Amino acid sequence: MALIKKFRIDSYKEISSVIELKNISVFYNNRQIIENLNLIIRKQEILGMLGPNGVGKSTIFNLITGLKDPNYGEIIINGINSNKLPINERFTKFKLGLVPQYGGLIHDLTLSDNLKLVSEIHIKEKEMREHKVNKLIAQFEFESLLKVKAKDLSGGQKKKLVIAMALINDPKILLLDEPFAALDILTIKMLQEIILNLQSSEEITIVVCDHQARDLLNCVDRAIILSNGKIIASGSPNEVISDKKAKTHYFGDEFNIT
C-alpha cells in the first residue's frame, strides 16, 4: 500500500506543545514499565506509538488520561502540571477524547441511541445536542445504520461509531488505542482517511497506538518506537524504519512501508 498521507509536519520548531511527559517512570508491582521517559506531543500533529507488547504504549495513554499516576515525573497538558488532576477534570478541561481498543459503546442500544446517550452527558442544550449528533451522522455516513443495534454492526462500523462518540465533546486531543486491530484492508484505509480528515478539518492533535506498523506509519507525521520502557527512535516514518535501534528491537531488516 502506498503512503496515503500527502503532507507531513516535518518541522516542529514553531509548533507549540500540547502534552509533555517529563522524566516519567512507572512501576507495576515493582516491575518498571517506563524508565525516565521524555515525550513532547505538539499541536495538531498525528503521533504514532509502536513497540512490542508490554513496553508502555497503553501506559502512556493511561498517564495522559489519569488512569495511572507516574511514580516519578510530570505530566504537562496545555502548560499545566496535571499529575493531581482527576480523570473527569482532564477530559473536560483539556478536551480529551479516547477511543479504546475494546468496548466504548453499549451493545444493546442502536447506533443512534449510543450517539444520543453520549451527547446528553456532554451537551446541556437540546438543540446543540441534536445538531452535533446530526453532524456526526452525516460526517460518518451513518444514515442507513441509525436503527441497527451496536452488537449487530461490523467491526469497522463499530470502530467508526466509537470514534464518532469520542468526537461528541469536540476534543482537541484524541487518543486512539489500536484502531486498526482485526479490520480488513478497506476498513483500515477508511479509518486512516478519517484520522487525516480530523487532523486537517477539526485541527485535532491525534495519538495512535497500534501493532499494525504499516497502517500506522501510513497516516502519521511522526512515530516513536518504544522498547524496554524507553523511546529508542523518533522521527518521520522513513526515519524510524531506517533507525538501527528500531530495526534491531522492532522492525527487522526487511520492513518497509511502500
Image (spheres, rainbow, N blue to C red):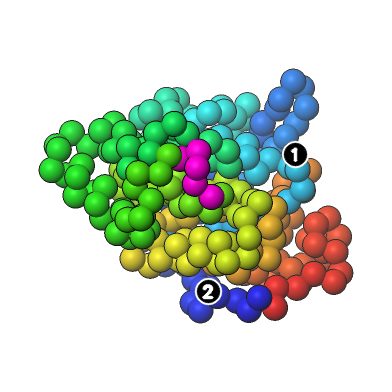
For mark 2, give the secondary structure: loop
- Mark 2 neighbour density, 10 Å: few (under 14) some (14–19) many (20 or more): some
Q: Which residue is mark 1?
A: 54
Residue at horizontal 14%, vertical 38%? 126
Quarter assignment of residue 127: top left
Q: Nearer the viewer, residue 148 or 257?
A: 148
Q: Nearer the viewer, residue 185 or 76?
A: 185
Magenta-highlighted residues: 150-154
Residue at horizontal 73%, vertical 51%? 51
Q: In this rendering, does residue 148 appear at all?
A: yes
For this orientation, the residue located farthest to the top is 29
96 sits left or right of 37 in the view? left
Which image quarter holds the N terminus? bottom right
N-term-proximal mark, 1 vs 2: 2
Residue at horizontal 55%, vertical 58%? 47
Which amino acid type corresponds to the residue marked 1 in the rendered image?
A: Gly
Q: CA distance from mark 1 to mark 2?
A: 29 Å
Q: Nearer the viewer, residue 228 or 97?
A: 97
65 sits left or right of 184 in the view? left
**Tag 1 and tag 2, C-beta contact below 8 Å:** no
Say if the magenta span includes residue 184.
no
Q: Position of residue 153 (x, y in %)?
A: 49, 46
Q: Which residue is mark 2?
A: 5
